[in-house]
Structure formats: structure tokens, C-alpha cells
Image (tube, helix red, strand yellow):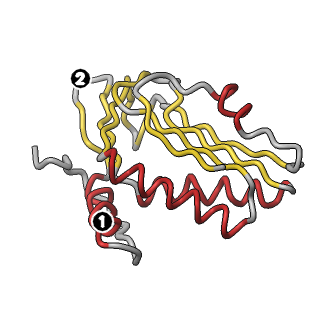
Amino acid sequence: MKIFRFTHGPVEPTALRAELADPACGGYASFEGWVRNHNEGARVSGLEYEAYEALGSREGERILGEAVERFGVLRVACVHRLGELQVGDLAVWVGVSAPHRDEAFRACRYVIDQVKHRLPIWKKEHYANGDSGWVNCERCASAASAAAAGPGPHSHEHAERHPHGR
């Protein structure tokens, strides 16, 4: 079983974990990514996530399928928040159930790393001083173009630019 989805509401880890329960699995691992109060020396008061949802969902499902194939896990899920989030909110959750712990740990790490690098998700941080800025959007736009074109290497450049040219 694999589940990837975006949500505009809160992520509920307890319910998601229950969906991954399987008597054939002895190992479970999860990752929770929370909104922190700082980034690169600036105090963050909150943030917004935008995504190209149709493409992101397809690529998210592809990533989960790769985790199943590479690590032999039986159940894997990932949920990513969109919209406005506050400091401390849960932004992304990954959970994996596998016959053994090593596969669960490795697959969980693989999923979050690939989601961060390949999905067309854009983050706008709001700072305590009233400013705001889009973070790493050049990399996300490049990944979206690469994902639409098919498998291949993904750009890892970091430039702050709004994905829609604003």
C-alpha cells in the first residue's frame, strides 16, 4: 500500500500510522517536518506552501513506488501540507512499515529526501520583521520541468525566485 497526498488541513500522524499497521511488518519509521522559527539567520513567523498538485501527486506516487521497489517495504505514505502554516505546525509526514527496521529507516529517509528534491512545491517564508520571501524556487521549478520530461537528473541550484515570476 502506498499513499501520497497533499492537504490544506492539519496532518494527523496517529491516523496515518494506523493505516500503515501490518502484521507482516516488524519495523516502522516515520519523519515529521515542522515549521521552525528561523532560517538562515532570519526569524520566521510562519510560511505558505504552494504546489503544482497534479504533477506533484504523480511524482509523489512514483517516489513511493521507488521506495517499495528499492527497500522491499510493504506500506508507505507521505502527506504534505499546503497553504498557510504557523511555527510548530506539521508541514510534511512520511511513514513506512517494513518486515525489518533497517528497510523502514532507509525507505523513510529516501522518501523525504526525494520529496524535497523532486516535487514542485514552493515555500514562502514570512519573517518577524514583516518581510517575506520564496525559498529555493529555482530548484523546485527545475525539478518540476524534469519530472514533466521524465526520469533523469534533477537540478539542485538554490536561488530565491517566485515560481510564477512575481
Q: Give how far across and how far down residue 164 sits, in percent.
A: 15, 47
Residue 89 drawn above or below residue 78: above
The foreground one among 95 and 54 is 54
Q: Quadrant of residue 117?
A: bottom left
- Image coordinates for residue 143, horizontal then vertical, percent: 34, 63
Could you say whether the residue bearing mark 1 is in a helix, strand or loop? helix
- Residue 49's quadrant in the figure? top left
Tally of marks:
2
At a point 37% along the width and 67% down the height, the residue shown is 156
Q: Identify which residue is drawn at 89% across, 48% down.
A: 26
Residue under label 1, please give it: 148
* Category of crowding for the residue at label 2, using alpha-carbon neighbours closer than 10 angstroms: few (below 14), some (14–19), many (at least 20): few
Q: Which residue is pictured at 20% across the width and 49% down the height?
A: 163
Q: Nearer the viewer, mark 2 or mark 1?
A: 1
Residue ranking furthest to the left: 166
Q: CA distance from mark 2 to mark 1?
A: 35 Å
Q: Callout 1, which amino acid?
A: Ala
Q: Nearer the viewer, residue 70 or 137?
A: 70
- Residue contact at pointers 2 and 1, CB within 8 angstroms: no
Direction from residue 117 to residue 166 in the image, left or right: left
Q: Secondary structure at mark 2?
A: loop
Q: Quadrant of the C terminus?
A: top left
Q: Is residue 140 left or right of residue 35?
A: left
First in sequence: mark 2 or mark 1? 2
Q: Position of residue 41 (x, y in %)?
A: 40, 39
Residue 88 percent location from the top left of the image: 52, 24
Residue type marked 2: Gly
The residue that disc 2 covers is: 130
